[in-house]
Amino acid sequence: MILYLISHQERRASINTTPSPDTSHKQLRGWVADRLRADIHEGRILPGEWLRQEHLAQEYGVSQMPVREAFKELAAEGLVEHIPYRGVRVVELSADDVEDLYATRIFLECKAIRHAALAVTPEEIAELRAVQEQILRYSQPEQANLYRPLNKRFHLLIAYASRRPYLIRALNQMWELVPAMFWNILPQTASAFLPERVAPDLVEHEAMINALENHDPDECEKLIRQHIEEAGEQLLSVLRSRK
């Protein structure tokens, strides 16, 4: 069975910009969470910005209750944080946080790909190749808004192929932090990415697919470790050079 992962951005594209009058409370809470998540990911709400419940309720055309519940959902994902006596704001990540994030990604994704190498199906390999073909079409820096959701899907499809529920949940949550991380420290990457990473990404993705198809967990782990380490090192180099 092909395990197809739909990103929050894609889900948002499939919903109206305003909720239907007959939307249930549970659906409304999800709608607000999706809308708020997308506004953070797409840079309309910036890291460190305070989120005012009343203001957002007016902007989104809803009552304050679904906004309050959406805050709880996004706080559990790590996108926002509640500051006692002050309110809710979008998280801000330091360069040290980014370093820790990449180190954690390495640990989790190495475990996931090892399990995936033993369990992946031909249908899942075909889906990874299909996503990779789409990625190849959006490799220009100004196409980051199209490239990034596909890159995220590529990595999470590998996680899903692991059949390891905890790893899947952890990696889903981690990948929710990635867009906020870029806009937090390198605002110019909100609409573009580091161009020096594009060509290596494409080559490394292809190598990972081949290793998965060969059911070689050692090669898979080596490739994804190198892939994440090099991406993290390049990003941190840019961050620290700007101090």
Image (cartoon, helix red, strand yellow):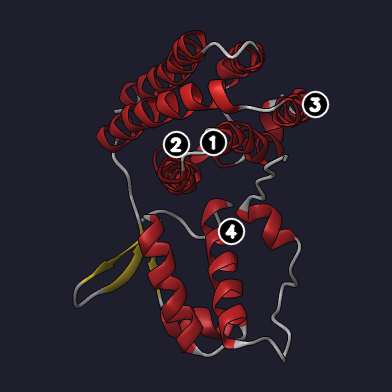
On screen, residue 184 above or below 212: below
Q: CA distance from mark 4 to mark 2?
A: 18 Å
Task: Please say whether residue 49 is visible from this viewpoint.
Answer: no
Residue depicted at x 63% and y 50%: 7
Q: Quadrant of residue 230?
A: top left
**Mark 3 to mark 4 CA distance (whole Å):** 23 Å
In front of the other: label 4 or label 2? 4
* Disc on res. 186: 2
Q: Amino acid at mark 3?
A: Arg
Location of mark 3 (residue): 137
- Where does the C terminus fall, quadrant-wise? top left
Is label 4 in contact with label 2 (beta carbons under 8 Å)?
Answer: no
For the residue labelled by badge 3, is the local secondary structure a helix, a strand or a loop? helix
The structure residue drawn at horizontal position 43% and vertical position 67%, both measured from the top left corner, is 73
Residue 22, x across and y down, in percent? 72, 91
The 10 Å Cα crowd at callout 2, few under 14, some 14 to 19, many 20 or more, is some
Report the residue marked by disc 1.
189
Mark 2 or mark 4, which is nearer the start of the sequence? Answer: 4
Q: Element at badge 1?
A: helix
Q: Mark 3 or mark 2, which is nearer the start of the sequence?
A: 3
Residue under circle 4?
38
